[in-house]
Amino acid sequence: MISYLKPIFKLFLPLLLANFGMFSLSLVDSIMLGHSNAEHVALQNIGDTPVTIILLILNGLLQGTLFTTAQAFGKQDFIAVGQSLRSALANGLWLSLITLPCLLFAPQLISFFNYTPEQTFAVAKVVRILSGAIPFSIMFFICTFFLNGIKKIWIINVFILIANLLNIFLDWILINGLFGFPQLLSSGAAWATSIVRMFLGCGLLLYIILNSDFKKFQFWKRNNECSIRTTQQKLGLSATANLLSYEIGAAFCLFYSAHIGILQASAYTLAYRIFILSNIIGVAFAVAGTVLSGKYTTLFSPELHKIYKATITANILIMLPLCLFCFCNAQTLSLLLTSDSKLAALTSPLLQISVFAMFMRALNSIQIILLRNTHYLLIPSLWYGLCFVIITPLCCIWLGNATQTTGIMWALTIGNTSAAIILHYLFINKNTI
């Protein structure tokens, strides 16, 4: 197990930078809005939620690209590597076409919630702006999975660094209304996000296609296309079920907090941004483990179990000090996230509770992705759905109340803890297959 720690950390660091770079885009949006208008933090997040759910579904459906690419690259089958990208792009094209119309009706659905007309209008604008960038987000997902699979993560980091600088500049101008632009607040953040997604999707795809180092993959050569596409779709459906299960639980928590009050929803949004750090770390370790274990596609492999144990150990070494830091500095972090004293006071206790959910979220992110790499899909997905579609919402209703939102964060903790315990049992118990 110890022998795998070094290669895991070697792959983990650039993956973490790439994932954190994507996370920081939404974090910057929330922080800038938090310092401009506390209410628009929640309005932007509520408008972003239906788009995020669609993108998570698409991300999941296309996640098979990572597994087929990593497995083909591990076997040095370069033609299959190229075919993996080709198949994913074909899948992504029709997926983007059938999902765009779905978001046209999102503003009408939002009008059913108990928001004022002004709030409904602001949320609807965010939805419409973000929906236009969905095809570019799909291109980015595919290219990211492909580059992760062939261990060219540094390319993603370069593009994401540029994207973050562009996002900060656009947020600064569009949220606050500088250089002749009107003050757009949540709509400004949405426009900045959409422009950045366009840059990432087009830029990465052009780099891959035009780079002479990638000619050996022969992207346009047809070879065993149906088999690769079938495998990608099978793994993608499982990933989608897992992502959607989790997002349903998280979305329920957000809308329940908005039911309590819009400022409470803003506090939950800010605390949730920090909580998502755990998912970034967990996914980075999981992808590192997946790339490292590309040749081992069965739970009966002793080497895969060594990689699993090494990945979990490495994750604990990172997550424990991070969680302790967040717990001890919750008040300071809340003041950094917003200049509104009332919002900061609501956010601080949520940050302290979120550290428990953070730790467990990182664990179950690793477990579910490594299980998917072995094509062990049905039973883990069913348990995963139980934890987030049923247990989390029920705990949210049971623990949440009209005067505080700490119960909502405890509900997330219980859901993530349940998933981590169950998935660990499924991974180490070979007889469950």
Image (tube, grey):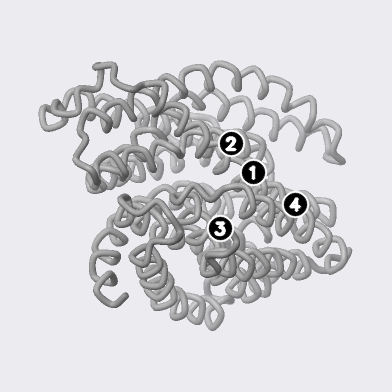
- Which one is in front, 325 or 91? 91
Label 4–label 2 contact, CB within 8 A: no
Please give the label number shown on residue 244.
Answer: 1
As measured in the structure, the alpha-carbon distance from the residue carrying label 3 to the one carrying label 4 is 21 Å
Q: Which residue is mark 4?
A: 389
Q: Is residue 59 above or below residue 363?
A: above
As measured in the structure, the alpha-carbon distance from the residue carrying label 1 to the one carrying label 4 is 9 Å
- Which one is in front, 225 or 82? 225
Q: Residues within 10 Å of mark 3 (few under 14, many from 20)?
A: some
Q: Which residue is mark 3?
A: 273
Kind of residue at disc 1: Leu
Find residue 308 and report its horizontal and vertical position in percent: 41, 66
- Is there any visible trace of residue 144 in the rendered image? yes
Quadrant of the rendered structure where residue 127 is?
top right
Kind of residue at disc 3: Arg
Q: Residues within 10 Å of mark 2 (few under 14, many from 20)?
A: many
Of the residues under marks 4 and 2, which one precedes in the sequence?
Answer: 2
Label 1–label 2 contact, CB within 8 A: yes
Label 3–label 2 contact, CB within 8 A: no
| Residue beneath the point at 58% across and 61% down | 338
- Which one is in front, 82 or 333? 82
| Residue beneath the point at 36% across and 70% down | 306
Of the residues under marks 3 and 1, which one precedes in the sequence?
Answer: 1
